Amino acid sequence: LENFLSQYYNFQPNLPGEIFLPFKINQKKLFEMWLKSMKKGKLKIVLPKKGENLRIVELARKNARLLLDELLIQKQKQKDRTSKMVTALKADLNLEYSPRSIVCFDISNTGVTDAVGSCVYFDNGKPKKKEYRHFKIKGVKGQDDYKMMREIIGRYFFRRKEENLPMPDLLIVDGGKGQLSAAVAELKYLQLEDQKIVGLAKRLEEVYVPNFSEPLSVSKSSPGLNLLKLVRDEAHRFAISYNRKVRSKRTIKSQLDDIPGIGPAKAKMLLKKFGSVAKIKKLTAENLADTQGINKALAELILSHLNQSR
């Protein structure tokens, strides 16, 4: 109760004249002095023993208990719903155990540049973001999604194998038979043939498993399929956001770092101060020169270069 009082009233702009408590606290006088100093007026901490004030304290206690119980019920319902999705997925995929740990991989590229991959991790049906990973594609030239998928899966599982980390219960690849075959080939190369894996094709939400040319027959209303789609969509979102970040950095680099006299440190400083290249373009040479390390001659050179490269 003392901890709550100090945390709650430290951020309240309007303090009351009286605070009713359900039981005595050790630092009552100290709290009163502290609260009075913030209120700059009279304030009393009261422990009602009878009458209307005691009824109010009891009513507040009952309301708090009801609210807490409701929150706990909602939390349990969410937990049960998640567990049902995981259990349903076990049945849908004919697995020997419930896939509590799931990873999913996706590729995002723009033309032949800025190809990246993503990996998201779900634990018992919920995202575990500290386990998310992103990858810059290093070993594939051109647009070959199959090879890119193989590269990022290889890098991820090789590292887990080297560090003796547990393998996920289920691996999902975003795509159909082609992406699945590429992933299976990489797992075989790493001697991880026992790793459970499926492919989820976007167009018809079809689920593919190794060694079968036709998709599994999974009900479109299955909670297990909903979980697969949830994980796949999160991998797609994460891949796209990282792709945009990479493209943005490349654009900034090409516009600022190629200017004579502007190195990475000055480019970073300018972007931090002004926010973007577009905003720098709108400055006058005088405004830009009012920056540490940028004289008027360099400011004019920067603006000339940026406005010529529109």
Image (cartoon, rainbow, N blue to C red):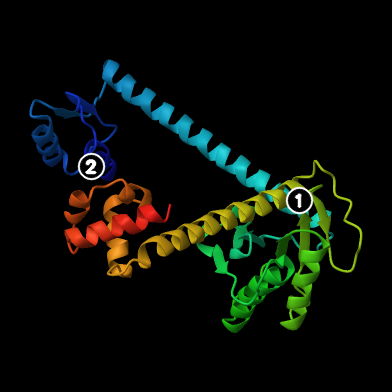
Using the rendered image of the protein, determine whether residue 102 is visible from the camera's viewpoint.
no
Mark 2 residue type: Ser
> Which marked residue is nearer to the observer: mark 1 or mark 2?
1
Residue 231 x, y percent position in the rendering? 66, 53
Mark 1 residue type: Lys
Please name the residue shown 79% across and 49% down the image.
205
Q: Is residue 91 above or below residue 155?
A: above
The residue beneath circle 2 is 6
Please name the residue shown 33% across and 69% down the image.
264
Give the quarter of the figure containing the N terminus.
Answer: top left
Find residue 155 and report its image quarter: bottom right
Residue 180 x, y percent position in the rendering? 78, 66
Sequence-wise, which precedes: disc 1 or disc 2? Answer: 2
Find residue 101 and report its image quarter: bottom right
Q: Is residue 227 above or below residue 164?
A: above
Separation of marks 1 and 2 at Cα, in angstroms: 52 Å
Please name the residue shown 36% across and 52% down the image.
307
Out of 177 and 77, give the one closest to the viewer: 177
- Tell me the SS state at disc 2: helix
The residue beneath circle 1 is 202
